[in-house]
Amino acid sequence: MKTTRLAALTIAVTAALFSSQILAEQSVRHLPERDVTVPDTVSPSMQAVIGRPLSPIWREHPKSADDWKVLIARTAEARLATLPDLRERLGAKVEPTVIGGVKAYLVTPGSLPEGNRNRLLVHLHGGGYVFFPGESGTGEAIMTAGYTGMRVISVDYRMPPDFPYPAALDDAMAVWREVIKTTDPKNIAIFGTSTGGGMTLAMVLRAKKEGLPLPAATAPGTPWSDLTKTGDTYFTNEMLDNVLVSDDGWLGDAAKLYANGHDLKDPMLSPVYGDFQGFPPTILTSGTRDLFLSNTVRVHRKMRAAGVDAELQVFEGQSHAQYLADPTAPETREYLAELTRFFDKHLGK
């Protein structure tokens, strides 16, 4: 009898261990090392972008405010060098201005169609809440103005290390309160990529909270909608995304620097945790190799669940924000044509 009980106990323990092993194997997927080639399903110019080496700064960890400022200045200088040719190519005019006490840039397309004269796009630049201050943050605004034929206000919001949260969002909201005094919100869209996409979402959440009018549409590109390392592609696309590469470099440091001790899951920092009820029509964009693909997909699914008119476009092979990496690439033209179509559909309605 004792032998029978012992055998039964042994079987039970073995089954439990086996079950635990199965659960462990199900919760963690071990992938073999492999080489991932550049896809031949994209244009030659996009193949060149996708084939670039990993970002040279991805693993930097600035130790002080001065270290951050050196890195910020270096990246800004490199970006500024590309803008004269971009402005000339697209015929866009960029003028510094101040709106609601906040520095900004008015970007005017070379040709402003009659149907766009009452329309306005509010732009929030990317850069992890730390990069691309001043005019260095206007590249996306220039491209969007040039291709859509709409005027753009690019907000030069304050950033760390000197101005952590909520300075950036406060500046964006100050601009919003001012522009809706002179332009009907039904004729305005808010857009931006990466940090700019996250701020676009946070602006609408805050406008809802404050009872302010909402824009007619938004276009968050690959939004940094979750400042924590949460979401499948933070892991599956780590080291595959050649732009952000990993949250374990400067990116994760920048999240903490910006948050300045606040809960990273506060919806004003990580808007994917917010309430999307009543959001305006939204078009979201990402790429199959984007570290923030899950950030984008999670926002899209929450919007759909909330009844929001939300579109999702995902580009083949692209890492983070590479739909803007080459202004001459067919994929860039396609992306901006989609934005133009979306804005034409929803602005002024």
Image (cartoon, rainbow, N blue to C red):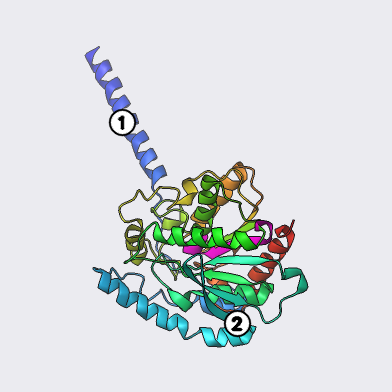
Note whether residue 295 is visible: yes
Along the line of sight, which residue is nearer the eye, 78 or 331?
78
Which mark is in front, 1 or 2? 2
Q: Earlier in the sequence, mark 1 or mark 2?
A: 1
At horizontal 66% and vertical 50% (from top left) the residue drawn is 309
Left-right relation of 75 to 330: left
At horizontal 66% and vertical 75% (from top left) the residue drawn is 147
**The magenta stretch spans which residues?**
185-197
Indicate the position of residue 30 as horizontal and vertical percent values: 39, 53
At horizontal 62% and vertical 86% (from top left) the residue drawn is 89
Residue at numbered disc 1: 14
Left-right relation of 345 to 336: right
Along the line of sight, which residue is nearer the eye, 106 or 339?
106
Q: Name which quarter of the figure residue 15 lies in.
A: top left
The alpha-carbon separation of the residues under discs 1 and 2 comes to: 73 Å
Note whether residue 41 is visible: no
Quadrant where the N terminus sits is top left
Q: Name which quarter of the figure residue 188 lies in.
A: bottom right
Q: Amino acid at mark 2?
A: Lys
Residue 93: mark: 2
Quadrant where the C terminus sits is bottom right
Indicate the position of residue 146 as horizontal and vertical percent values: 65, 77
